[in-house]
Amino acid sequence: MPSLNPRDRTAPLLALDAIADGGFAEVEVDLDGDAESLLLYRDGAAVRGWLNICPHAGRRLDWAPGQFLKSKDGHVVCAAHGASFELGDGLCVAGPCKGESLRAVPLTVRDGQVLLA
Ligand code: FES
């Protein structure tokens, strides 16, 4: 599993090509001294990221590390109780935390590598 050296926030998280367009990935990073799992979503040449923590009950969204559910409507679905989140802004549009949002983590893509912004 790719990981970020906690002392080097400029280290790549993973290669853009490691994520299928329209697909997901999970990486472990050190954010302000805390190990955090991130959900990454690739949209063409861009990658968006959120903490892999559901606002409903604080569970991980993936059913196994890096295995995220995507609905036919194009939402990521929490594996715990089925909350659905938009992949543009992380807003929950259905389920037990409707109206709440995933916590975004700013990312950038440079030279084919995904990095913390
Ligand atoms: S923890 Fe995600 S829907 Fe309950």
Image (tube, rainbow, N blue to C red):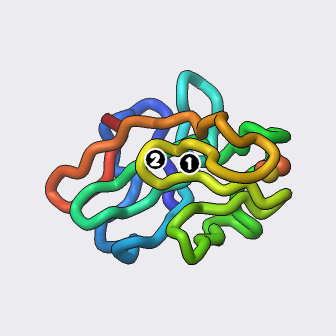
Residue 111: x and y in percent read 15, 56
Report if the CB atoms under discs 1 and 2 are less than 8 Å apart.
yes
Which disc, if any, is residue 38? 1
- Side (left or right) of 82 relative to 109: right
The quadrant of the image that shows the C terminus is: top left
Which disc, if any, is residue 117? none
Residue 75: x and y in percent read 56, 62
The residue nearer to you, when weighing 29 against 92, is 92
- Categorize mark 1 by other alpha carbons within 10 Å: few (<14), some (14-19), many (20+): many
Against 45, residue 3 (above or below) is: above
Residue 88: x and y in percent read 41, 49
The quadrant of the image that shows the N terminus is: bottom right
Q: Quadrant of residue 107?
A: top left
Using the rendered image of the protein, determine whether residue 41 is visible from the camera's viewpoint: yes
Against 58, residue 64 (above or below) is: below
- Side (left or right) of 107 relative to 91: left
- Categorize mark 2 by other alpha carbons within 10 Å: few (<14), some (14-19), many (20+): many
The amino acid at mark 1 is Leu
Residue 26: x and y in percent read 56, 59
Q: Residue at position x 30%, y 73% from top? A: 17
Q: CA distance from mark 1 to mark 2?
A: 6 Å
Mark 2 C-beta closer than 8 Å to ligand 1: no
- Side (left or right) of 116 relative to 111: right
Q: Which residue is mark 2?
A: 49
The amino acid at mark 2 is Gly
Mark 2 element type: strand
Q: Earlier in the sequence, mark 1 or mark 2?
A: 1
**Disc nearest the viewer among 1 and 2:** 2
Furthest toward the top, the residue is 32
Q: Quadrant of residue 78?
A: bottom right
Against 2, residue 115 (above or below) is: above
Q: Residue at position x 74%, y 69% from top? A: 64
